[in-house]
Image (spheres, helix red, strand yellow):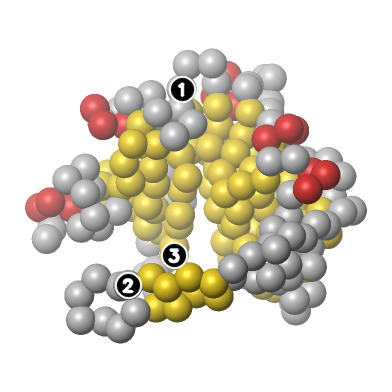
Amino acid sequence: MSSSRAAGSNFDSQVPGDQPAARWEKYEGNPVLGGDLGTCFDMSVIATQGIYRMWFSWRPKHGIGYAVSSDGLDWHAAGEVVLGPDEDSPAESLEVTRPYVLDEDGTYTMWYAGHSASRVVICRATSSDGLKWDRQGPVFEPYALWEKSSVMCPSVLRASDGQYHMWYSGGERYEPDAIGSPGLTSFSTKVTCTPPTSVSRTDLKTLR
């Protein structure tokens, strides 16, 4: 297990519209993760049982790492990935990145990007402890023109009616061109699914 820190600063951000400026204060100990671990990015954090749990993209390992913290500041990362490339799965043979995790009544559900040599898709996996994961394979694949060969960076919420809503990025393999999100861009697309292993698309331009 390892952790790391460095220096940070403060900045002001003006929120559009009539809302007052929002002020964010950067933690002086930033970064809270990285250092000897190498490039760590696109994390998903939840708090359960008094512990902060983080899953993160771990570039040197081509997979998803895991870290824990008691306060959200001092993080301790496992030495190996908890989910890595799967040579037996064409969709995930190159690397896996960009996790998003929900705690669903004691079961962790993860949506993440599966990379192959030709495209990037969004996959799903479940776990009882956040460490050992049962893969269900791809649940969402690129098909819209703006998505090109890649969909990634899923962000998922589960509504009170049990339906799942996903916002995601699409476009280039490593630097997305646009975000599918309600009312954000002309490419806005919301993904809904019930149950979470099947998905359907809704063009939000018809819903605004």
Disc 2 versus disc 1: distance between alpha carbons? Answer: 37 Å
> Badges 2 and 1: C-beta atoms under 8 Å apart?
no
Q: Pick the quarter of the image with the C terminus.
A: bottom left
Q: Residue at x 26, y 82 (%)?
A: 19
| Image x and y of residue 116, in percent | 55, 21
**Which of label 2 and label 3 is nearer to you?**
2
**Vertical placement of residue 166 versus 53, above or below:** above
- As helix, strand or loop, the secondary structure at mark 3 comes to strand
Q: Extreme top residue here?
A: 117
Residue 135 in the image, given as x and y percentages of width and height: 64, 39
Residue corresponding to mark 2: 14
User: What label sits on residue 158 in the rendered view?
Assistant: 3
Identify which residue, 144 or 104, lies in the foreground: 144
Please identify the quarter of the rendering in which residue 57 is found: top right
Other-residue count near label 3 (Cα within 10 Å), few / some / many at <14 / 14–19 / ≥20 = some
Residue 38 in percent (x, y) is at 75, 40
Mark on residue 79? Answer: none
Disc 3/disc 1 C-alpha distance (Å): 27 Å
Which kind of residue does numbered mark 2 sit on? Answer: Gln
**Label 1: which residue?**
119
Give the number of the mark in front: 2 or 1: 2
- List the single residue furthest toward the right: 1
Q: Amino acid at mark 3?
A: Arg
Residue placed at 46% from the left, 22% from the top? 119
Percent from the top left, x then y, of residue 84? 71, 34
Task: Name the side, left or right, on which 63 lies relative to 174.
Answer: right
- Residues at circles 3 and 1 in contact by the CB criterion of under 8 Å: no
Helix, strand or loop status at disc 2: loop
